[in-house]
Every structure is written in structure tokens, then in C-alpha cells.
């Protein structure tokens, strides 16, 4: 009886760990979105995909660009021209599909992305700051890391148009 309880307990723990790791992996950032959220989705599609209740506020009706935050996830969704255009990450714990997160070194990102990653001076923070940018082979999507003194401070992925915006919606 005692052995059966231990086995049941261990199976339960294994199931919880597997579920947590699987959920984390499904919310990794890739050039074309995060989890079930795909760049180019409108609010109705995002709501269905994420089981959310996003609505465009009155103030947002007057703007062509604004941000939304999905429930339970530490990312920002840039909505541009009424579609998901970019996913922004400013904190530790959200990984790219290549395993990179805020706080990692430029060297680690360059190793993970290889020759796809292009280095350019940061708009405001050069020479200590850089942009590390990788685009998909068709040039439609990309990911951009912002760095300071060799460390990634933030990153975002989405349409090539959206990741080129230096100040987000500003």
C-alpha cells in the first residue's frame, strides 16, 4: 500500500512537471509569434486562440498602434493596423525558440542564431548598445535584441516593419 502511494505521488509530480515545461515551451518567442498567437492575427482571432477578451478601447480607436497584455504572460502585444504586429519582452523568464532570454550575453545570442544575426549600433545607446536582428528567409518576420554593454536588455519579434520601430508605438 505504501509503495502504491509513492508511485502514485511520483507519477503525479512527473505529470505536473511535464505540464509546466510543456506550457513554458509552447510560449517561446519565434519570429512569427508566441504560443498560439501568430503575427497578423486580428483581435477576434487572438481572443479565440488565447481564450482572451481583448477589446479595442475608445482611446485605441483613435490610434493605429497600441499594446495589449495577455493574461498570465509577461509579454506585450503590439497591435498595429488592427493586427498583432510584434511581441515585446522586457523581463527574464521568456525564451526565444533558440533559448535566449533577457540577461543573456550578445555572444550567447550570436552563437544561438549564427550568421542570421546582424549587429548594428543602437539608435540611442551606441557605442555600448547594439541591435542584434535576425529575419526569416522571406524577410517578412524577424527578431531583434537590444543590448547594453554586452547583455540583452529586451527583445521583440514580429513583422519586419514592426521590429524596425525604434520606440514601439511612439
Image: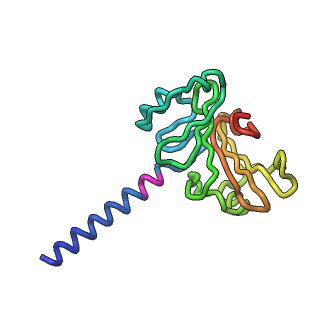
In-image side of 5 versus 58 (left or right): left
Q: Quadrant of the N terminus?
A: bottom left
Stretch in magenta: 21-25
Is the image coloured rainbow, by chain, by secondary structure, or in one colour? rainbow
In-image side of 26 versus 19 (left or right): right
Where 134 sits versus 40, above or below? below
Nearer to me, 118 or 93: 93
Where 8 sits versus 48, above or below? below
- Residue 139 seen in the current view: no
Where 8 sits versus 110, above or below? below
Q: Residue furthest right?
A: 127
Residue 129 sits in which quadrant? Answer: bottom right
Q: Residue furthest bottom?
A: 2
Q: Quadrant of the C terminus?
A: top right
Q: Position of residue 30 (x, y in %)?
A: 58, 45
Query: How many marks overall?
Result: 0
Q: Position of residue 83 (x, y in %)?
A: 58, 28
Q: Position of residue 115 (x, y in %)?
A: 73, 52
Amino acid at each position: 500500500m505504501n509503495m502504491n502511494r509513492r508511485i502514485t505521488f511520483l507519477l503525479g509530480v512527473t505529470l505536473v512537471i511535464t505540464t509546466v515545461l510543456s506550457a513554458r515551451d509552447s510560449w517561446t518567442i519565434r519570429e512569427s509569434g508566441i504560443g498560439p498567437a501568430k503575427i497578423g492575427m486580428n483581435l477576434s482571432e487572438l481572443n479565440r486562440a488565447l481564450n482572451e477578451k481583448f477589446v479595442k478601447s475608445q482611446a485605441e480607436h483613435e490610434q493605429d498602434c497600441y499594446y495589449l497584455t495577455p493574461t498570465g504572460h509577461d509579454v506585450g502585444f503590439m497591435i498595429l493596423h488592427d493586427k498583432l504586429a510584434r511581441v515585446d519582452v522586457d523581463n527574464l523568464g521568456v525564451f526565444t525558440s533558440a533559448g535566449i532570454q533577457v540577461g543573456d550575453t550578445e555572444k550567447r545570442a550570436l552563437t544561438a542564431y549564427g550568421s542570421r544575426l546582424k549587429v548594428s549600433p543602437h539608435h540611442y545607446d551606441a557605442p555600448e548598445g547594439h541591435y542584434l536582428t535576425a529575419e526569416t528567409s522571406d524577410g517578412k518576420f524577424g527578431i531583434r535584441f537590444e543590448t547594453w554593454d554586452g547583455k540583452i536588455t529586451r527583445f521583440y519579434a514580429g513583422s519586419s516593419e514592426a521590429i524596425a520601430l525604434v520606440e514601439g508605438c511612439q
